[in-house]
Amino acid sequence: MTAEPDPTLYNKDLAPVPESQRTWGVYSYASLWVAMSVCIPTYMLASGLIAGGMNWWQAILTIFLGNVIVLIPMLLNAHAGAKYGIPFPVLVRASFGVRGANLPAVLRALVACGWFGIQTWIGGQAIHSMLKILWPAGSAEPFLWLCFAAFWIVNMYVIWRGLEAIRVLDDLGAPFLLAVGLLLLWWITGKAGGLGPVLSQPSKFQTSGEFIKFFIPSLTAMVGFWATVALNIPDFTRYAKSQRAQIVGQALGLPAAMTLYSFIGVAVTSASVILFGEAIWDPVALIGRFNQPLVAFVALIAILIATLTTNVAANVVSPSNDFSNLDPGRISFRTGGLITGFLGIMMMPWKLMSDYSSYTFGWLVGYSGLLGPIAGVMIADYFLVRGGRLNVEDLYRRNGEYEYNSGWNPRAVASLALGVAAALLGLVIAPLRWLYDYAWFAGFAVSAAAYVILMQPASTKLSRFA
């Protein structure tokens, strides 16, 4: 950067990554997605569809389709990160303004805090289950909260070590996690009589109408699952060796890893119906049903590793940058991580995970109505309004191209509000419930269209920066 950046908009964590430090290749991005996908929320996503009434192929098709759909905005938002080396909270300054960017950044950060709490709660449960295997007296409820606290501290330690530690953890952990998942699938389906009986479990839906009524919000939930990272993917692609590296790595990693690990969740949950007469969607609870200490201990170790790698990469990197963006001079990446950790506890994840319906149709679909509109504004701004061109220096200073009105772009804020209103309208007006079922899609489409229309008067001004 040739011009001096504004200290209220700049610190070393938010600065553009120089070419010499962009070291992530195809394998780095593929393994990142394997590490983030192979986690208990993914398993619960799939097992929740089985518990809700789908058969195995309906659940897998829903998950695969949802991840192919969300890959599109993922790659579109990733482009600017790889091209300019900038993170999400800096990229969003182009559309919302250098100060207005704090609005979408904080919305994204709060969702990440909720996810951080969920993952940490799952990890604490896994440690508690391991403790009960080694020491039966450890089953008392106070020990569960101690295990939750212990896993929280481990997460904070990893994020304190920085982003390079996250990349190394992902590269080493991804192959191991897939192998353990396949081993668990082989073991439990063997107990249930093989894949044949497991996959023969019928759908509970008697008509196409019943299936569609469950399928639509389920598909929205699948998109919503990664709608968070679809926004902050520049936080990772800013380290890409090339556009090809991040595109190929993500295209190979996301749909394949999610579908494979979801199949494990689908098959294991279907096996639980055969073995126990009910669909057990929580793998920690399912493992506790087997009187096999060695198998349970290995499986719980795998759960811990999977939860740790996903939690740090998917749920701490983005909010750390987002909170740092609020006051770059005082809030570093590490401090932002600590804020994330404390807010994650305050959001009471044990309530968010009370049952599969709350998890899928309450949490996932609900927040997708907030994040879809943000993605709509970002993508419309970068590709349709600016043609993929950014003035990087002005992203870090006041009174430049992205100053708008005292640092806020009212057109972006209005577009975001319209999108959120459209997505969540179905919650208060029963005949429009379908808008909520399509929350991410409705919010994205309305916000993108509104932004392009509202920004038309400014298009001639933007042309001089091309």
Image (tube, rainbow, N blue to C red):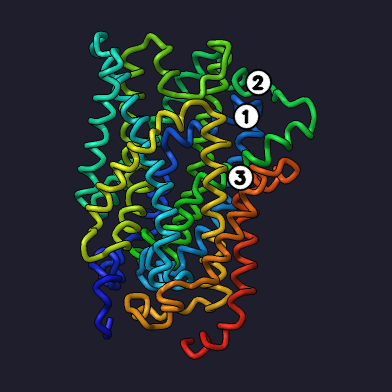
- Which class describes the residues within 10 Å of circle 1: few (<14), some (14-19), or many (20+)? many
Counting residues from the start of the chain, the first of labels 1 and 2 encountered is: 1
Q: Are marks 1 and 2 in contact (CB under 8 Å)?
A: yes
Q: How many marks?
A: 3
Task: Residue 85: give x, y in percent of width and height.
Answer: 35, 69
* Residue highlighted by disc 2: 201
Q: Which residue is depicted at the point 67% across and 45% down?
A: 426
Q: Which residue is depicted at the point 25% across and 47% down?
A: 338
Task: Residue 107: give x, y in percent of width and height.
Answer: 44, 53
- Which class describes the residues within 10 Å of circle 3: few (<14), some (14-19), or many (20+)? many
> In 3D space, how far apart are the residues under numbered discs 3 and 2 (Cα atoms)?
24 Å
| Amino acid bearing label 3 | Thr
* Residue highlighted by disc 3: 220
**Can the viewer see residue 378 in this picture?**
yes
Quadrant containing the N terminus in the rendered view: bottom left
Q: Nearer the viewer, mark 3 or mark 2?
A: 3
Q: From the viewer's perspective, tell me whether residue 98 is left or right of residue 380.
A: left
| Secondary structure found at label 2 | loop
Task: Please state which of residues 33 and 211 is positioned toward the viewer in this rendering.
Answer: 211
**Position above or below: 400 against 38:** below
Examine the image and state in which quarter residue 205 appears: top right
Q: From the viewer's perspective, tell me whether residue 143 is left or right of residue 459.
A: left
| Amino acid bearing label 1 | Trp
| Amino acid bearing label 2 | Gln
